């Protein structure tokens, strides 16, 4: 598409079953009751000048440009704040209105810089357009006297600048920060002529304020007072392409605005059903990694990891790799080979990798990053509900009355969803937070959690069982729902179990460290407060009882009847952009696409017939099993697409040993990541900007990813996998990712109705999309569970084997920050580093004092498996006895201290509970220095021109 601004209807859409008909400039218009006159006019093709109005925030009525005349009404009311009425007759273009609008515009222009021709917003400025619309040709008032010129610009933010000279104080930025983002970082300071927009306190800049750089203010600004620095540097975009963000599992839709092959800016798309026109700092601004100097764009090989890399042609790289794989397969058998799919790549690319492993390598040794994050979600929800995904769309939260957030930090990990949640909380919904750490949602502007259950790490099951105890013993269960929708025998067994006194909040208080009365109050609120919705994250799944916790959550939702309608449900907040899709596409070693077990003869025969190959009926190896098998010599070759297991997986020493033992490690990625230190082949990857395909977000929403520029390495990722398959002798011949999706739809019942053509026409679809649900499924389990009846499963609390003691008296838990993403490979190569340039360790003041530590000190973090050093942040966000860090920076290698303990059902690592000691340090550890030296050596490239 060419470049034009997104349509703006001035005021938000109103949803009402009552319709109102009125006349606007002689045209009959029918709109929902409550719609503004301004929006009604614009929906019928009319135009009313405005400056303070935009359809992302509530009407304000301050600019006085949108005045209209209404028959029978006095004066000239503002159309943005005037609701329609049946039979209303509106006039938007009269001589009187023209005079008023021109006079008001003269006042704006008389206090505005006259630099339109050199302004970065020239021909893309609402003020300029509105001046032209009202026919302003000169300014009678002159430019002398008091004005707002000469103010200092605020360029403190790395991504956008604030030029107060160009600000018209329309308050759109302030309202966007309040209403859309929910941070309330901006304000109008002063009164009357002295009114000015400010970030934070009077002495603050944007950088020092509470601003989270979501970009909502920049998007709302009608002038260039707030503008992206990239636009100032590159110029106005020439075209725009709608695509999907490649960061977290929210799946925001963006307009990639281009000038030639150069990306100028990413602007959130108002019609995006996951984000509704909002964004966060990562999706909005942190795309510079695509052109970073670290990007590897030529294939490389080496015989030994001790050697430097050698750049080669694609032909040589693929031939070398295929020959190696075929030789290993011939000598050691198909089960000596395996692959890891990427949760950052598209559905189509993930599908091809698992197909390559199964049909080309000849084994089921395929796994994905969901192994170390949400594999317990797949297991737990499939056992209780019958499907391995969340139950709601994101819009559903706006109908929730009580929201329980457990083991998740949405403001940092899923900020666009968090903004919507905060909006609902400000409207009056109640919040229960279950987390060892005091996350921002516990207390932030105009939001206070009704209950914060600051549990001891590792006791999720105990807390949820105690809540269930209260609900059952106090008669708060929804018996009607249970009798109609659930297996009664299973419920009765579960109810008897949770009702036992050993599961009461009082009995479990010494274990959970949650005050019994607080827990009882939270349980009563969830059971009786109306629509109850549960949102959870990796603080649930990354435990030795991760699957048990997911089933406990499902039990609680069924017991209270909070399934199958809007405002309720069980909602896993997926960490990566396509982790849901990677699982859907068959990335687990025991499941084919659509979560169908590989041992099922009928399912296997379906794929065998389509692929013309015999499939191994035995489940393959999980990632930890691959590493173990590498050490015993039975696993020899690994293809890793778009994952960095050395930095992201637990017990770094064990991962490194497993990779080093392999004969062939193929890394297919954007950068020489940590895993590439042990690789023999490097195949350049493509960014989401350089490919076509689809992502599936946390709400099961399938959305198109559209190519906006050519791949820097020459191939999109799906093409690389296809070329490798061809080199191995497979006869693949896909011409476009749409053909791959057609194959997915042909073989996978939940995707039967999905095609690129439908996605292009409808924007997105939520699976299942099939004959039973031809338009998709925003809400799951409406009339019944996928498995038929919901199944309650007894989940007994079993303490983790990871114990504290005299040597390791503290418990470490891990998480993420807003500005960084996963292992940081993308965000560390952007300006986001200004907010988080290194991983730090959070510790309670009492623990710090006992160790003689103070804020900013270097500390040694040690566990039974390893140690690292990092700087200390002293904070009461964490409880005494608990410390917290992130894993975004390879210099820290936080996972060197995490252990091999994992979820009993899925092997998801227990990142959230590690016994540690923290002591003073003088700087990086000996291991860190040794690793840094090895990493530098491993990244050497012998610059030999490719053929």
Image (cartoon, grey):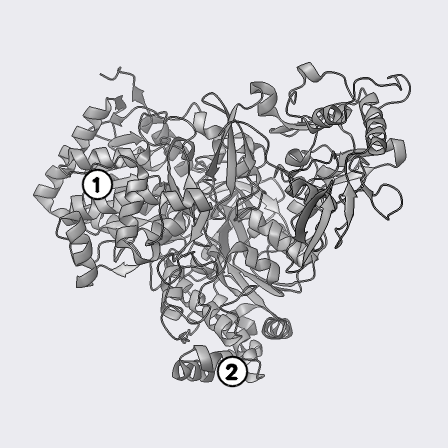
The residue drawn where x is 41% and y is 57% is 910
Q: Where on the picture, by quarter, is residue 530?
A: bottom right
Question: Number of numbered discs present?
Answer: 2
Query: Where does the image place residue 444, in percent across and percent down from the top left?
Result: 68, 52
Nearest the viewer among 306 and 239 is: 239
Nearest the viewer among 246 and 15 is: 15
**Label 1 environment density (alpha carbons within 10 Å; few <14, some 14–19, many ≥20):** many
* Placement of 904 over or under 747, stated as above or below: below
Q: Nearer the viewer, mark 1 or mark 2?
A: 2
The residue drawn where x is 53% and y is 44% is 272
The residue drawn where x is 50% and y is 69% is 563
Nearest the viewer among 117 and 507 is: 117
Q: Are marks 1 and 2 in contact (CB under 8 Å)?
A: no
- Check disc 2 and report the residue beneath it: 479
Q: Is residue 816 left or right of residue 752?
A: right
* Placement of 924 over or under 874, stated as above or below: above
| Secondary structure found at label 2 | helix
Nearest the viewer among 743 and 462 is: 743
Query: Where does the image place residue 481, in percent across and percent down from the top left?
Result: 50, 78
Mark pair 1, 2: CA separation: 56 Å
Query: Where does the image place residue 43, in percent across and percent down from the top left?
Result: 64, 43
**Label 2 environment density (alpha carbons within 10 Å; few <14, some 14–19, many ≥20):** some
The answer to whether residue 905 shows anywhere in this view is yes
- Looking at the rendering, in which quadrant would you find the C terminus? top left
* Placement of 515 over or under 452, stated as above or below: below
Query: Where does the image place residue 375, in percent across and percent down from the top left?
Result: 37, 57
Work out which residue is located at the far front of the displayed protein and give it. Answer: 26
- Check disc 1 and report the residue beneath it: 662
């Amino acid at each position: 598409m060419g470049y034009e601004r997104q349509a703006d209807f001035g005021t938000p859409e109103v949803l009402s079953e009552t319709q109102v008909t009125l006349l606007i400039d002689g045209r009959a218009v029918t709109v929902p009751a409550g719609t503004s006159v301004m929006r009604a006019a614009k929906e019928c093709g009319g135009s009313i000048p405005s400056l303070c109005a935009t359809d992302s925030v509530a009407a304000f009525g301050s600019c006085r440009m949108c005045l209209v005349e209404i028959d029978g009404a006095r004066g000239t009311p503002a159309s943005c704040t005037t609701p329609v009425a049946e039979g209303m007759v509106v006039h938007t273009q009269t001589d009187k209105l023209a005079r008023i609008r021109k006079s008001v515009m003269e006042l704006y222009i008389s206090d505005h810089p006259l630099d339109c021709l050199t302004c970065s917003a020239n021909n893309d400025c609402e003020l300029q357009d509105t001046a032209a619309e009202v026919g302003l040709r000169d300014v009678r008032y002159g430019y002398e006297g008091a004005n707002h010129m000469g103010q200092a610009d605020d360029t403190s933010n790395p991504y956008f600048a604030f030029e107060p000279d160009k600000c018209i104080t329309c308050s759109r930025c302030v309202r966007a920060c309040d209403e859309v983002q929910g941070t309330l970082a901006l304000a109008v300071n002063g009164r009357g002529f002295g009114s000015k927009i400010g970030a934070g306190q009077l002495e603050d800049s944007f950088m020092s304020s509470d601003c989270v750089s979501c970009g909502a203010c920049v998007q709302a600004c009608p002038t260039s007072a707030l503008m992206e620095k990239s636009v100032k540097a590159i110029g106005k975009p020439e075209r725009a392409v709608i695509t999907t963000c490649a960061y977290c599992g929210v799946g925001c839709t963006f307009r990639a605005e281009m000038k030639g092959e150069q990306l100028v800016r990413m602007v959130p798309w108002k019609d995006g059903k996951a984000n509704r026109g909002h964004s966060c700092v990562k999706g909005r601004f942190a795309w510079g990694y695509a052109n970073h100097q670290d990007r590897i764009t030529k294939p490389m090989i080496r015989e030994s990891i001790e050697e430097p890399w050698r750049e080669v042609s694609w032909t040589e790289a693929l031939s070398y790799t295929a020959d190696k794989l075929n030789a290993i397969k011939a000598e050691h058998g198909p089960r000596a080979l395996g692959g890891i799919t990427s949760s950052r790549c598209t559905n189509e690319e993930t599908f091809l990798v698992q197909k390559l492993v199964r049909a080309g390598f000849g084994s089921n040794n395929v796994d994905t990053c969901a192994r170390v994050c949400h594999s317990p979600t797949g297991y737990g929800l499939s056992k209780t509900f019958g499907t391995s995904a969340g139950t709601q769309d994101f819009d559903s939260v706006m109908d929730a009355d009580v929201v329980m957030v457990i083991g998740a930090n949405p403001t940092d990990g899923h900020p666009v969803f968090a903004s919507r949640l905060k909006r609902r909380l400000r409207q009056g919904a109640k919040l229960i937070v279950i987390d060892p750490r005091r996350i921002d949602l516990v207390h932030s502007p105009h939001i206070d959690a009704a209950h914060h259950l600051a549990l001891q790490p590792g006791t999720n099951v105990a807390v949820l069982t105690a809540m269930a105890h209260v609900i059952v013993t106090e008669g708060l269960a929804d018996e009607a729902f249970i009798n109609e929708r659930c297996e009664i025998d299973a419920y009765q067994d579960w109810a008897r179990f949770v009702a036992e006194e050993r599961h009461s909040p009082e009995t479990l208080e010494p274990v959970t460290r949650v005050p019994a009365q607080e827990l009882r109050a939270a349980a009563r609120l969830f059971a009786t407060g109306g629509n109850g919705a549960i949102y959870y994250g990796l603080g649930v799944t990354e435990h030795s009882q991760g699957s048990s916790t997911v089933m406990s959550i499902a039990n609680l939702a069924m017991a209270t009847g909070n399934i199958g309608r809007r405002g309720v449900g069980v909602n896993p907040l997926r960490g990566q952009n396509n982790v849901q899709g990677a699982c859907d596409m068959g990335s687990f070693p025991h499941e084919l696409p659509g979560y169908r077990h590989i041992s099922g003869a009928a399912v296997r025969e379906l794929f065998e017939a389509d692929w013309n190959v015999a499939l191994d009926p035995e489940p393959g190896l999980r990632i930890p099993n691959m590493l173990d098998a590498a050490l015993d010599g039975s696993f020899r070759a690994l293809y890793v697409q778009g994952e960095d297991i050395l930095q992201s997986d637990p017990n770094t020493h064990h991962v490194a040993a497993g990779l080093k033992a392999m004969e062939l490690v193929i890394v297919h990625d954007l950068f020489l990541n940590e895993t590439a230190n042990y690789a023999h082949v490097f195949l350049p990857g493509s960014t989401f900007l350089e490919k076509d395909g689809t992502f599936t977000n946390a709400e099961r929403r399938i959305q198109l990813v559209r190519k906006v520029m050519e791949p820097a390495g020459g191939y999109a990722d799906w093409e690389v996998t296809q070329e490798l398959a061809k080199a191995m002798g497979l006869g693949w011949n896909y011409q476009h990712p749409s053909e791959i999706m057609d194959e997915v739809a042909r073989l996978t019942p939940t995707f039967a109705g999905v095609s690129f053509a439908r996605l292009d026409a409808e924007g997105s679809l939520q699976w299942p999309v099939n004959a039973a649900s031809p338009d998709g499924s925003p809400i799951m389990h409406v009339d019944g569970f996928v498995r038929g009846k919901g199944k309650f499963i007894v989940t007994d609390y079993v303490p983790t084997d990871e114990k504290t003691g005299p040597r390791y008296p503290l418990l470490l838990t891990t998480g993420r920050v807003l500005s960084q993403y996963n292992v940081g490979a993308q965000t560390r190569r952007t300006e986001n580093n200004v907010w988080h340039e290194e991983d730090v360790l959070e510790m309670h003041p009492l623990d710090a004092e006992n160790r003689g530590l103070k804020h900013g000190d270097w500390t040694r973090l040690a566990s039974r498996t390893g140690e690292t050093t990092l700087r200390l942040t002293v904070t009461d966000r964490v409880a005494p006895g608990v410390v917290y860090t992130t894993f975004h920076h390879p210099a820290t290698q936080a996972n060197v201290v995490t252990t091999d303990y994992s979820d009993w059902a899925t092997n998801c690592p227990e990142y959230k509970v590690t016994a540690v000691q923290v002591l003073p340090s003088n700087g990086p550890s000996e291991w860190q220095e040794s690793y840094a030296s090895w990493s530098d050596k491993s990244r050497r490239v012998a610059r030999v021109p490719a053929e």
